[in-house]
Image: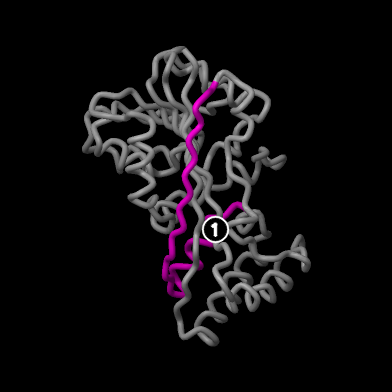
Amino acid sequence: MTRSSDPVRRDSFDAVAEAYDRARPSYPERLVDELVALADIDEGSRVLEIGPGTGQLSVPLAERGAFLVTVERGPRLAEIARRNLARFQHAEVVVADFDCWEGSPASFDVVVAATAFHWLDPSTRVARCAAMLRPGGSLAIVQTRWGVAQGDDPFFAASQTCYSRWDPNHDPRLRQARPEDVAQPCIDLAITEFERVARRRYLCAREYSAATFCDLLGTFSDVLALEEGCRTGFLACVAGLIESHFGGRIVRHDLYDLCVARRAG
């Protein structure tokens, strides 16, 4: 989980905040339940969430009674997160870059980063998360891998023609990852002040129409990085492919990895 060297990609989500809120799915309920159980989150737990986006995980955590502080670097994303969390009295959204944020040390029971840890500075992210935790507190990291292989996937193969035509950085040697090919997160926690690392893995099947799948693709940083004309052409190509060759609907399999590590104390 290395940080992107391109800050434009890291910050691109804020420009499509409304689409991000509409298209990005919530996390699987079982993942949320096990995160809460493994991290000992209960009513009144102080939870810090890094990079909440528009609240895809924040809302379920707030629903479980956590005192939630989220730190989101994108002001448009943060504004929508505030809207989604407005009904919770003990939920706060802070606009800041966590890599520079000066929070209160040792003031949280849990620190959570869902589909966001890889955007943090790899040289400081573990230490900064640890500093926010009380002794015995937990760090929970969720890693998401979109569209993994589950048996034959004719759509993945067919869609490569759209990538090769419209994405100048497309690698024709790219192969679809299988779950067993995806490394689990938190490897770098084993030699730090964290201990008792628990890992869980979840596979989630989702059905999309041409429109809803292209809405989702339009929130991915590699698609957002395309020049506007290429982005428009690519999304039109994918939508046309789904409509003409797949009956207007496809099923994608998304892989989620959860790890929860306890800070020594």
> Where on the picture, by quarter, is residue 32?
top left
Q: Amino acid at mark 1?
A: Trp
Q: Which residues are magenta?
A: 194-221
Q: Nearer the viewer, residue 50 or 214?
A: 50
Disc 1 secondary structure class? loop
| Figure check: 182 above or below 170 | above
Horizontal and vertical percent position of residue 104: 44, 13
Q: Which residue is more in the foreground, 52 or 38?
A: 38
Q: Position of residue 2 (x, y in %)?
A: 67, 39
* Residue 240 quadrant: bottom right
Q: Residue drawn at (64%, 78%), measured in percent from left and top? A: 158
**Location of residue 148 by image quarter:** bottom right
The quadrant of the rendering that contains the N terminus is top right
Left or right of 168 in this view: 208: left
Residue identified by numbered label 1: 146
Q: Position of residue 195 (x, y in %)?
A: 52, 24
> Within 10 Å of the Cα at label 1, are there few (<14), some (14-19), or many (20+) other Cα atoms?
few
Q: Residue furthest front?
A: 196
The verdict on residue 33 being magenta is no
Could you tell me which residue is drawn at 42 percent across and 70 percent down?
207
Could you tell me residue 110's position as x and y percent? 40, 26
- Seen at 65% across and 55% down, the residue is 181
